[in-house]
Image (cartoon, helix red, strand yellow):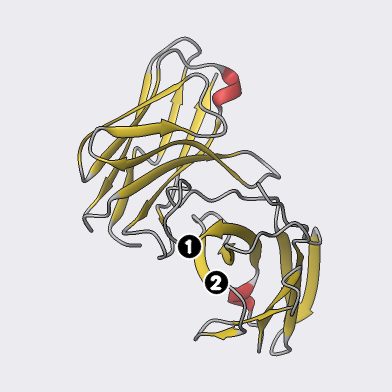
């Protein structure tokens, strides 16, 4: 399985933008890039996913490099509630034999300062 | 989230006893998953199900078994619990491929 590399931790100030990087140099042409986050004492929650084009939703934006070997999750204005572990995961979006399985790495611990 | 209930939420038991964790969903999602999470680590997949009575092993399946006799329930059983199975267990569901997984709030299991 293709793997991702994320920084162990990052810090931000409240109301400032946050850029969380993810490297995935062995990504295959059919791999989607998924981001989940896990708030303290909770299960993970979906944030965003994409294939080639940049994606936006109400929670965040996903910027994907042209060669797809890296991506960046962008939180436009961090709040204290955004403090969490952020996971970048590669996976097939549909079909194949993956059965929707996700392989979590250790993720990036985001600390947001007031 | 997505009508997922894990039970019990907390359990303390002794080595060698059988333990069953239940994941119940109300959304009629086809796929269900059991993960475990240990301190400082991401989630690791134990078993998953792609339909009623259709299950398969994940990355860390040794010592665990599962059953899915109906769409809404996915049971995880530790036949003879060991201290190494002390962990937080998360259940997740997926309506169909291409959509995000939804996770329960977890079960904290301590085996003494």
Q: Is residue B18 left or right of residue A15?
A: left
Q: Position of residue B66 (x, y in %)?
A: 35, 28
- Mark 1 secondary-structure assignment: loop
Mark 2 and mark 1 lie on one chain; the one further toward the N terminus is: 2
Q: How many C-alpha atoms fall within 10 Å of the one at disc 1: few (<14), some, or many (≥20)?
A: many
Looking at the image, residue B101 sits to the left or right of residue A88; the answer is: left
Q: What residue is disc 2 on?
A: A49
Q: Nearer the viewer, mark 2 or mark 1?
A: 1
Circle 2 chain: A
Q: Which mark is residue A93?
A: 1
> Farthest residue in the top direction?
B16
Query: In the rendering, at what x and y percent does residue B91 appear?
Result: 41, 45
Q: Are marks 2 and 1 in contact (CB under 8 Å)?
A: yes
Asked where in the image residue B99 lies, by quadrant, the reply is bottom left
Circle 1 chain: A
> How far from the left and from the top, in percent, is residue B82?
54, 16
Q: Give the vertical position of A34 relative to B55 (above or below).
A: below
- Nearer-the-camera pick, B101 or A39: B101
Disc 2 to disc 1, C-alpha distance: 9 Å
Horizontal arrangement in the rendering, residue B69 relative to residue A97 (left or right) = left
In front: A101, or B11?
A101
What quarter of the picture does the C terminus of chain A occupy? bottom right
Query: Quarter of the image holding residue B38?
Result: top right
Residue at far left of view? B70
Q: Is residue B72 positioned above or below B11 on the image?
A: below
Look at the numbered disc 2 and give the secondary structure of its residue: strand
Residue A11, x across and y down, in percent: 80, 73
Q: Is residue A11 above or below residue A79?
A: above
Q: Residue at x 65, y 64 (%)?
A: A86
């Amino acid at each position: 399985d293709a793997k991702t590399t994320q920084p162990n931790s990052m810090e931000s100030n409240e109301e400032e933008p946050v850029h969380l990087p993810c490297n995935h140099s062995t990504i295959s042409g059919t791999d989607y890039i998924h981001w989940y986050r896990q708030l303290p004492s909770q299960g993970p929650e979906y944030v965003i996913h994409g294939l080639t084009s940049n994606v936006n939703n109400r929670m965040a934006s996903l910027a994907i490099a042209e060669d797809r070997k890296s991506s960046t999750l962008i939180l436009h204005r961090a709040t204290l509630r955004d403090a969490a572990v952020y996971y970048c995961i590669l996976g097939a979006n549909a079909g194949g034999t993956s059965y929707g399985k996700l392989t979590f790495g250790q993720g990036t611990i985001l600390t947001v300062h007031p | 989230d997505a009508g997922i209930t894990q039970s019990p939420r907390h359990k303390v038991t002794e080595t060698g006893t059988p333990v069953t964790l239940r994941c119940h969903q109300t959304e009629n999602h086809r796929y269900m998953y059991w993960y475990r999470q240990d301190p400082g680590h991401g989630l690791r997949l134990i078993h998953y199900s792609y339909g009623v009575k259709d299950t398969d092993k994940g990355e860390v399946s040794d010592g665990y078994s599962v059953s899915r006799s109906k769409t809404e329930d996915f049971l995880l059983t530790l036949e003879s619990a060991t201290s190494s199975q002390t962990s937080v267990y998360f259940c997740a569901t997926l309506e169909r491929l291409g959509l995000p997984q939804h996770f329960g709030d977890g079960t904290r299991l301590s085996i003494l």
